Amino acid sequence: MKYELKIEQSEDTDGSIDLFRLSSIAESLKKIAEGALLLRIKGLSKAKKSFNLTGALKVNLTGVQKGSTILWLESERFEKTLPSFQTDLFRLDYQKDLHEKTPISLVVESFKEALENSEKSDLLDKPLLKDLLTFKKSFLSDQEIFTITNEGSIEGFTLVKSDFKKIQITETEIPSPEAVIVSGRIEELKFSNQRVKILTQEGLVDAFLSESFIPQDITAWWGKEATVTGTMHHKPGKRFSIEIERIFEKEPGDEFFSKRPKHESLEEQINRQISEGKDLNPLKSIVGTWPGEETDEEFDALLKSLD
């Protein structure tokens, strides 16, 4: 599949690109594509890999053209580079058409999810959002415009430097992964023995098996009460998924430790601080009014002031 990556109003000479800048773009695209692919296959963008993705993530630079600066890129569909996964894993909703996608189309899809559908997307997590933010380094000025188009499988996608403010807000609102204990009934998820649901007193909880967990070991627990320990990975929109590392028989009192943690959005943190009589957080000035006229440096300083 051939793609055109166009940098308009580029500070590079028309039809050329600085070698170090090209290296930065390439590394960022690779990180985003790898994270997006692992999230779709394993449920986590930084999941441990038990397989080699070098061939699947390969993107070739086939030419540089004038007209601002245009990079011609080419990559194969996953149906050619990930054949062993087509029958075993491509069964969840967002895996059904994965064989038709490429590394570049996953990059575009990830940016679109972060900018248009971050609150409801199952295709984002905190590490992947961090990877998206690394692409900001590819911009040399606020005026530059990146556009990615191809032969028809994706619509044209445009990215400007101010877009990263929204992505940074979303990433900042998501808590870091944390250890968790959850008790409940283990429910089977029809199309994958890698993923389960746990019916707790607070409702169904999404979970998946860690790399060290043998999938066959979970089958004995279907429909039974159990307690699991693992890591809670938060997603946008206050959603989360639990990476199961251990499972054992439920003991009296386990429910006490299995209350799932709650987290606040940036705006909720600010409102709570105001109600507690604390000084007004400077981020209040941009909540609900983004994007504003603040520079990137001022915006970063406002976010850091929450620490």
Image (cartoon, rainbow, N blue to C red):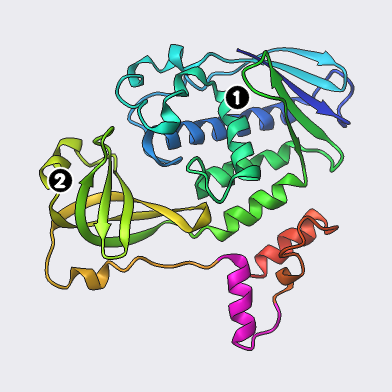
Assess whether residue 286 is covered by the magenta stretch: no
Residue 183 position by quadrant? bottom left
Location of residue 36 in the rendering, given as x and y in whole percent from the top left corner:
50, 34
What's under tag 1, amino acid-wise?
Answer: Ile
Q: Nearer the viewer, residue 194 or 237?
A: 237
The vertical placement of 289 against 211, above or below, is: below
What's under tag 2, amino acid-wise?
Answer: Trp
Q: Secondary structure at mark 2?
A: loop
Question: Dot 2 surroundings within 10 Å: few (below 14), some, or many (20 or more)?
Answer: some
Q: Secondary structure at mark 1?
A: helix
Chain-order first, disc 2 or disc 1: 1
Calculate the distance from the C-alpha at mark 2 to the C-alpha at mark 1.
39 Å
Location of residue 126 in the rendering, given as x and y in whole percent from the top left corner:
52, 50
Location of residue 132 in the rendering, given as x and y in whole percent from the top left corner:
61, 41
Whether residue 123 appears in this view of the structure is yes
Where, quadrant-wise, is the N terminus in this rendering? top right
The vertical placement of 216 against 90, above or below, is: below
Q: Nearer the viewer, residue 71 or 186?
A: 186
**Residue drawn where x is 15% and y is 36% of the image:** 216
Residue 291 position by quadrant? bottom right
The vertical placement of 220 against 249, above or below, is: above
Mark 2 and mark 1 residues within 8 Å of each other at the beta carbon: no
Where, quadrant-wise, is the C terminus in this rendering? bottom right
Please provide the residue range marked out in magenta.
265-280
Which residue has dot 1 on it?
104
Left or right of residue 270: residue 139: right
User: Can you tell which mark lies on residue 222?
Assistant: 2
Location of residue 164 in the rendering, given as x and y in whole percent from the top left corner:
70, 47
Foreground mark, 2 or 1? 2
Left or right of residue 92: residue 37: right
**Residue drawn where x is 19% and y is 55% of the image:** 185
Assess whether residue 279 is covered by the magenta stretch: yes
